[in-house]
Amino acid sequence: MEILVCVKRVPDTAENEFELNSAGNDLDRDDLVYSVNEWDNYAVEEAIQIVDKVGGSVTVVTVGDDESEEVLRREMAMGANNGILLSDDAFEGSDGKGIASILKAEAEKGGYDLILTGAQADEGAAQVGGMLAAMMDLPYASLVNQIDVSDEKTLKVGREIEGGNQEMNEIELPCVLSIQTGINEPRYVGIRGIRKVAKVEIPVKSAADLGVDTAAVGDAGAKVKRVDYFVPDLGDGAEMLEGSTDEIVEKLIEKLKAKGGLS
Amino acid sequence: MTQIFAYIPHKNGEPADIAFEYLSAAEKIDAGADVTAVVTGSGPDLDKVAEKMTSLYKEVVKIDGSDLAYPNAEVVRKALCSVLPKDAIFLVGHDTFGMDLAPGLSIKMDSAFLADAVDFEGVDNALLKVVRQELGGAVSCHVTCDLSSGAVITVRPGSFTPAPENSAGGTVVDKSSEAGDLGTRRRFLEIVEAEVGEVDITKSDVLVSIGRGIEEEENIEVAQELAEAMGAVVSCSRPIVDAKWLEKSRQVGTSGLTVKPKVYMAMGISGSFQHMGGVKGNPFIVAVNKNPKAPIFQVADVGIEADILEFMPELTDKVKEL
Ligand SMILES: Cc1cc2nc3c(=O)[nH]c(=O)nc-3n(C[C@H](O)[C@H](O)[C@H](O)COP(=O)(O)OP(=O)(O)OC[C@H]3O[C@@H](n4cnc5c(N)ncnc54)[C@H](O)[C@@H]3O)c2cc1C
Ligand SMILES: Nc1ncnc2c1ncn2[C@@H]1O[C@H](COP(=O)(O)O)[C@@H](O)[C@H]1O
């Protein structure tokens, strides 16, 4: 099975404390630590496991800048066979639709049987997979936490829905699936693994290479645009307990007693 | 005149909570807009929901079809494409159904797509101003969404004030005959219910809930000791279950269990809406987190900036001395 997995380089929420810049309208991006979107690692692991079972190859693709190459290499160190970087100044400022149309241009060239995305990325939008499917007129299922390859034409997929229940579906290939965390246990990538793929050629494709109309993507084509970041006024928030650890523990115990937290 | 359509999810003839939240969301988009409810399904359950919705909405569009008996988003999308006007503003919840339906619908309708709105600040020159969150709630931002050729918008459940029970005296309009061909390449098979665990976290008055801040599987013991001393039970956020450190039945949140304890101790949990969506009944929330900017501190009653791996053992010792 030929599988394409879409991956994105995102600020790592576990490694960063996010602050606004001095103008107060954007994140202070100077020292941000970036990594692969958590959901995308699960998608790549799933693709590798499918190919291990039924044969084929895994290609990882991203829309980004030069620095996004590192996430492709990381996923290739996991076991993806090929990486493709889609990069052009005209792509900057794309909304979800813009990203999906750029990915579509590449996906159509590859003749893939299966296209995987993460369920969501840093903006919590959960949009690119469903858009890509609709643009390519392929069937789609989101939040997939189980894939069984039934035969060459169909997959049986589980979607994780509210309450942790699972919605089982039969879906025809080719199709697009967005992958939910927990579907597998993504393998660990060490420095040695990364070093092995350090010299592999990663093609970079521009709007012209892809045949993408630059008026339809990037800031020019975006119907959804971010104006600013801000700190919301959410009222009082928590009462922060201060002092030495002993003092804090003492105060907390008093409160817990009052609220029925200690029986 | 703006025409807003709100999709009503339902089960066993009962509308989901979000059915009551769309009206205040729509009001914030355009106070003068016509708001129409859209219900899809089949048979008596559908009729019951459609009828119920006439107390909230002036017009309720009903699409009845045997293919729509289970809300398979691929089928619902086809029906909606046939029935909705091209420049509609369409609202649906940012939940597992909305995420499945909405992005593709916006492509098929050739309209803008805006995900997970938590607030609206009106329309200026066909540009809707929206409040969103990014990075798991760590930051908020304003975005604009161009409404000029219609829009599909997912709204965050619980973010808009539910409308009180009303008597709008609306009418049901049956558009089943306009739904068109509903054949799709994805077929719904069945629902597999989540497994029941050995410990029922929904029964405990006090939960010591751990998140990614627990760092290593071995450290879970530290939380278990605290829970034991407090007479509490250990629950957790999703990443702990994804890592297979605790069973799924311990997970709190929209894709886990809904709990209503008296006291909820959030230990190393950032406070994403999908996690907090499972914490109901207004418990006393204690948050311990080493990041003073963690969003959990906005919803907690008491906050402590500390490393949970150092703080929990101290608390355990003192509780044991009581
Ligand atoms: C459709 C869908 C459904 C979902 N359903 C759920 C659900 O049901 N339940 C759920 O929980 N999530 C759910 N999620 C995932 C959710 O979006 C978040 O990713 C998740 O809740 C984050 O878990 P966390 O807070 O433990 O981890 P993180 O967001 O990584 O937060 C960890 C926190 O721990 C702090 N920390 C780290 N180390 C320490 C330390 N030593 N001491 C103190 N603090 C420390 C950090 O500052 C951080 O705030 C869902 C997501 C999707 C897309
Ligand atoms: N710039 C990008 N390049 C490649 N894939 C992306 C990009 N942005 C989003 N995706 C894919 O779409 C998924 C969902 O992201 P989003 O719709 O932005 O929440 C991600 O997990 C990726 O698989």
Image (cartoon, coloured by chain):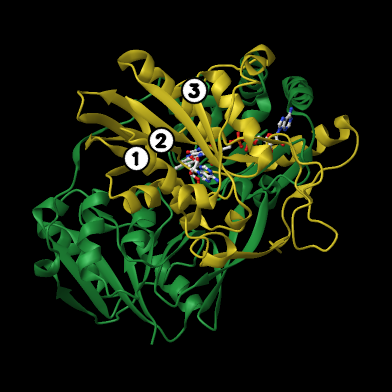
Q: Residue at x 24, y 82 (%)?
A: B169
What is the distance, in whole Å, between disc 2 and disc 3 at their CAs?
13 Å
Question: Which element carries disc 1, helix, strand or loop?
Answer: strand
**How much space separates mark 2 and mark 1, taking CA atoms?**
6 Å
The residue lying at 30 percent from left, 62 percent from top is B8
**Dot 2 and dot 1 residues touching (CB under 8 Å):** yes
Under mark 1, the amino acid is Val
Residue B294 in the image: above or below residue B226: below
Chain name for mark 3: A
- Using a 10 Å C-alpha cutoff, classify the residue at mark 3 as few (fewer than 14 neighbours), some (14 to 19) or many (20 or more): many
- Amino acid identity at mark 3: Ala
Q: Colour of chain B?
A: green
Where does residue B245 sit, x and y in percent of width and height? 53, 18
- Colour assigned to chain A in the rendering is yellow
User: Mark 1 = which residue?
Assistant: A176
Callout 2 and callout 1 share a chain: yes
Q: Secondary structure at mark 2?
A: strand
- Say which amino acid is labelled 2: Leu
Residue identifier under label 3: A80
Give the image location of residue B125, x and y in percent.
54, 84
Picture coordinates of residue B95 (x, y %)?
A: 41, 50
| Marks 3/1: CA–CA distance | 18 Å
Mark 1 chain: A
